[in-house]
Image (spheres, rainbow, N blue to C red):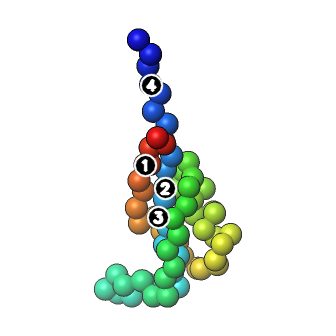
């Protein structure tokens, strides 16, 4: 019996924004989908693409390689 090894990668959805209003609305946002192995690496990749004063992770999902 052969064991099939499942391979996958993480996709981080990072939001870069200028400021956050009191009601939680983010102003002047950009959204990135970044392949990374950690939250810190994902944010660092986003920072290299477009400079914003603030970043946050809004979603993380795993994609299986078929």
Residue shown at the point (42%, 56%) measured from the top left: 60
Of mark 1 and mark 2, the one earlier in the sequence is: 2
Side (left or right) of 24 relative to 17: left
* Mark in front: 2 vs 4: 4
Residue shown at the point (60%, 56%) measured from the top left: 41
Q: Is residue 30 above or below residue 21?
A: above
Q: Which mark is residue 11?
A: 2
Question: Which residue in the protein does label 3 denote?
Answer: 13
| Gap between marks 1 and 2 measured at Cα | 6 Å
Q: Mark 1 touching mark 3, by CB under 8 A?
A: no
Question: Which residue in the protein does label 1 denote?
Answer: 62
Q: Mark 2 touching mark 4, by CB under 8 A?
A: no
Q: Mark 1 touching mark 2, by CB under 8 A?
A: yes
Side (left or right) of 44 relative to 39: right
The residue tagged with tag 3: helix, strand or loop? strand
Question: What quarter of the picture does the N terminus occupy?
Answer: top left
- Looking at this view, name the residue that lies furthest to the top: 1
| Gap between marks 3 and 4 measured at Cα | 29 Å
The residue tagged with tag 2: helix, strand or loop? strand
Q: Mark 3 touching mark 4, by CB under 8 A?
A: no
Of mark 3 and mark 4, the one earlier in the sequence is: 4
Observer-nearest residue: 59 or 52? 59
Number of other residues with Cα within 10 Å of mark 1, as a class: few under 14, some 14 to 19, many 20 or more: few
Q: Measured from the top left, where is residue 6 in percent x and y? A: 45, 33
Q: Is residue 53 above or below residue 42?
A: below
* Mark in front: 4 vs 1: 4
Number of other residues with Cα within 10 Å of mark 2, as a class: few under 14, some 14 to 19, many 20 or more: many
| Gap between marks 4 and 1 measured at Cα | 18 Å
Question: Which residue in the protein does label 4 denote?
Answer: 4
| Gap between marks 2 and 4 measured at Cα | 23 Å
């Amino acid at each position: 019996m052969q064991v099939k090894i499942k391979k996958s990668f993480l996709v981080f959805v990072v939001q870069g924004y200028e400021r956050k209003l009191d009601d939680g609305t983010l102003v002047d946002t950009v959204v990135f989908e970044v392949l990374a192995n950690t939250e810190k690496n994902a944010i660092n990749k986003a920072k290299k693409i477009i400079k914003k004063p603030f970043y946050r992770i809004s979603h993380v999902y795993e994609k299986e390689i078929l």
